[in-house]
Amino acid sequence: MKMLTRLGLLVAGLAVAAVAPAAAQAKLPAGVTPAMVEKGKTIFKGTGLCFACHGPEGKGAVGPNLTDGEWIHVKDGDYNGIVALVTKGVSATEAKTGKGPMPAKGGSQISDEDVKAVAAYVWSLSHS
């Protein structure tokens, strides 16, 4: 009897584990996957050069803190707004932090798909 109970708990646990990733993904913006977030994290800390101004954890340095939920240039940290901001950059006249402008794509040569991944990661920093 104990064996059947343990087996039942194991099966129930596997069922919950199978549903958990789908539930976590449901909280992400439309079109964003956990894999995009992970890819964006790698780009943010590497070829995207984002870490140079926002720090390796996105907590700010020359650029603003991306983890605190206070959005300066994108209303409510909207994912599509982050994609647009990273793509276009922030001009010196648009900069609201007094910390200077941000070049398009942070001055890197990342692709448009990479921008979407970085935006997914940046979105996740303040929406977790």
Image: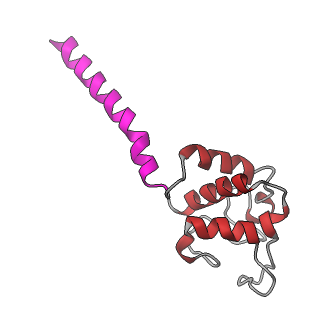
* Magenta span: 1-28
Q: Is residue 10 in the magenta section?
A: yes
Q: Is residue 41 in the magenta section?
A: no
- Using residue 83 as the reference point, say whether residue 2 is left or right of it: left
Foreground pick, 111 / 14: 111
The image's colour scheme reads secondary structure
> Residue 8's x, y, as percent?
23, 21
> Residue 77's x, y, as percent?
56, 70
- Name the quarter where the N terminus is drawn: top left
Above or below, 100 relative to 7: below
Q: Residue furthest left?
A: 1
Residue in the picture at 71% in, 57% down? 115
Q: Judge whether residue 65 can be spotted in this image.
A: no
> Residue 97's x, y, as percent?
72, 82
Q: Say how many tags the image has.
A: 0
- Using residue 10 as the reference point, say whether residue 128 is left or right of it: right
* Secondary structure mainly formed by the magenta segment: helix
- Using residue 58 as the reference point, say whether residue 76 is left or right of it: left
> Residue 67's x, y, as percent?
60, 64
Q: Judge whether residue 12 can be spotted in this image.
A: yes
Above or below, 91 relative to 84: below
Residue in the picture at 67% in, 56% down? 118
User: Residue 89 appears in which quarter of the rendering?
Assistant: bottom right
Residue in the picture at 71% in, 46% down? 42
